[in-house]
Amino acid sequence: MSNYFNTLPLREKLNQLGVCDFMDSSEFLDGVNALKGKKLVIIGCGAQGLNQGLNLRDSGLDVSYTLRKEAIEGKRDSWKNATENNFTVGTYEELIPTADVLINLTPDKQHTSVVNAVMPLMKQGATLSYSHGFNIVEEGMQIRKDITVIMVAPKCPGSEVRAEYVRGFGVPTLIAVHPENDPEGKGLAQAKAYCVGTGGHRAGVLKSSFVAEVKSDLMGEQTILCGLLQTGSILSFDKMIEKGIDAGYASKLVQYGVEVITEALKQGGITAMMDRLSNVAKIKAFEVSEELKTIMRPLFQKHQDDIMSGEFSRVMMEDWAAGDKNLLAWRAATGETAFEKTPAGNVKIGEQEYFDNALLMVAFVRAGVELAFETMVEAGIKPESAYYESLHETPLIANTIARKKLFEMNRVISDTAEYGCYLFDHACKPLLADFMTKVDTDLIGKNFNEGKDGAVDNRALIAVNEVIRSHQVEVVGAELRKAMTAMKSIKTA
Ligand SMILES: NC(=O)C1=CN([C@@H]2O[C@H](COP(=O)(O)OP(=O)(O)OC[C@H]3O[C@@H](n4cnc5c(N)ncnc54)[C@H](OP(=O)(O)O)[C@@H]3O)[C@@H](O)[C@H]2O)C=CC1
Ligand SMILES: CC[C@](O)(C(C)=O)C(=O)O
Ligand SMILES: [Mg+2]
Ligand SMILES: [Mg+2]
């Protein structure tokens, strides 16, 4: 097996990277019909497996789970997840030959061995589905030619896939059919029906390709979504401790601050987030984020380059082969950071205080979102896709930090995202060392506005507002958010 993307001629690489059509709601009028009466069998019952399965069943589809023998015999969490939710659970031999659609929701590192084990058991003409295309794109997995291969990739953690569905909405989703495996031409209809089953069609669906999904998903998770949220949290906390801010306050400001700050991002993009600051603070946050962008741009570009060339996958797969040596060591080291070990204090922090006292974190978020978006678009990823992978998903990951800090974020995301997050974090912290020596408590820990009369140069403020508002991530985001608001208001009507 070799990297599928790297085997493609340049023209085809660009072609597949550029597949990105925002699908009109009229494309989903057929609902779940293409899967109605079919047997859907999910392999694995973890973060995505359980939550997608619950949604699909509530949408009227026939869902059961197949788990490896050890999981059933040992009554592991995956077995408990499935049985406690009254799903039928069976071994590969019992369930796979009956499946019309086999949904692979095991960790990416297991895909080659799982798919090799299940493929001989799959019936002629069945469909194999993924929620991330790593195995197909980066490992070049070859699937039997009678099998249809589709992807339905929610752009968020599994917990949110369920929570949004229960609220009557959904999460933005990328769907694709692998061009090498669509023998009956039914892949797209099935992917659309699956997406209706998870509720994704209510929030926005991009018709994408396996290639475009993988190259954007890896970039988002390594940089802004997880890597920079980790780096920003640790550096912000450490700085406050160095400057004598109460540890409980510092811990709380960071843990909940990322969520409060990025909630504004969710509602109205970078513009809304920056508008939560006073004018004088906004100009400062803008300057700080511009400096951060200059320092971090080469690192963002390196991550994108390594993702495109396959170097990132090659190195991560070496770690898989070494029994996750680095991943496990990095996970343990994250658990030992002072931020992780310091509980949030029993101190009240008002909503506005999270902005006024954490200007540095606002600057990290603006810099990270814009850099991730710009770098993806420069590399040939379409702006809509880049928006989902940078701005849209950041608040959804920030929610996990608010729940239980970096431990929770890294538990909820895929192993692939976790590995990339640590890789970025370890390169980014030294890169920001000089910058951080200049940071004081006016940027993190204390109210930036204190002792200032709020006076600003009008022309400077107008120029800053213009730069923020005219950024492409804001333009495309405003359009995509319109579609989401429209869906919600139809529901409330
Ligand atoms: N985490 C997320 O939120 C997102 C994940 N994805 C993608 O979804 C897919 C699933 O990821 P995620 O939900 O994080 O995975 P999890 O780690 O949460 O799920 C693991 C599940 O797979 C089973 N499993 C693990 N190893 C094997 C094996 N060798 N053979 C059979 N079953 C196995 C586990 O069962 P047991 O060990 O008990 O046998 C468990 O049920 C990945 O492709 C990922 O990239 C996409 C979007 C977001
Ligand atoms: C952000 C990480 C992710 O890509 C996701 C939740 O979308 C993952 O792989 O977990
Ligand atoms: Mg993702
Ligand atoms: Mg991912």
Image (cartoon, helix red, strand yellow):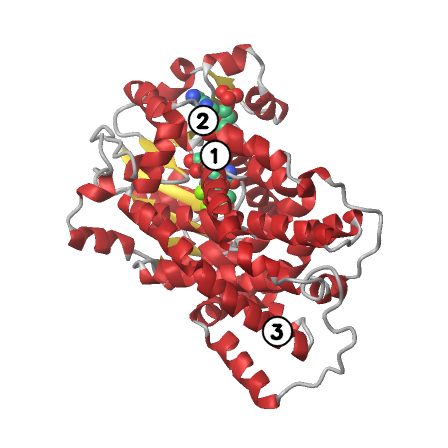
Q: Verify CB contact (< 8 Å) between mark 1 and mark 2.
A: yes
| Residue 209: image location, x then y, percent | 31, 49
> Which residue is painted at 69% across and 49% down in the image?
255
The answer to which of marks 3 and 1 sits earlier in the sequence is 3
Quick one: 237 or 63, which is closer to the camera? 237
The answer to which of marks 1 and 2 sits earlier in the sequence is 2
Label 2 crowding class (10 Å Cα cut-off): few <14, some 14-19, many 20+? some
The answer to which of marks 3 and 2 sits earlier in the sequence is 3
Mark yes or no: residue 403 visible. yes
List the residue tagged with mark 3: 284
| Residue 298: image location, x then y, percent | 39, 57
Ligand 1 within 8 Å of disc 1? The answer is yes
Label 1 crowding class (10 Å Cα cut-off): few <14, some 14-19, many 20+? some
List the residue tagged with mark 1: 415
Distance of label 1 from label 2 (alpha carbons): 10 Å
| Residue 25: image location, x then y, percent | 43, 59
List the residue tagged with mark 2: 324
> Which residue is painted at 43% across and 30% down in the image?
40
Q: Secondary structure at mark 2?
A: loop
Q: Quadrant of the N terminus?
A: top left
Q: Quadrant of the C terminus?
A: bottom right
**For the residue marked with disc 1, what is the amino acid?**
Asp
**Rendered view: 464 above or below 95:** below
The residue at the far top in this view is 73
| 201 lies left or right of 344 | left
**For the residue marked with disc 2, what is the amino acid?**
Asp
Mark yes or no: residue 209 visible. no
Q: Quadrant of residue 259?
A: bottom right
**For the residue marked with disc 3, what is the amino acid?**
Lys
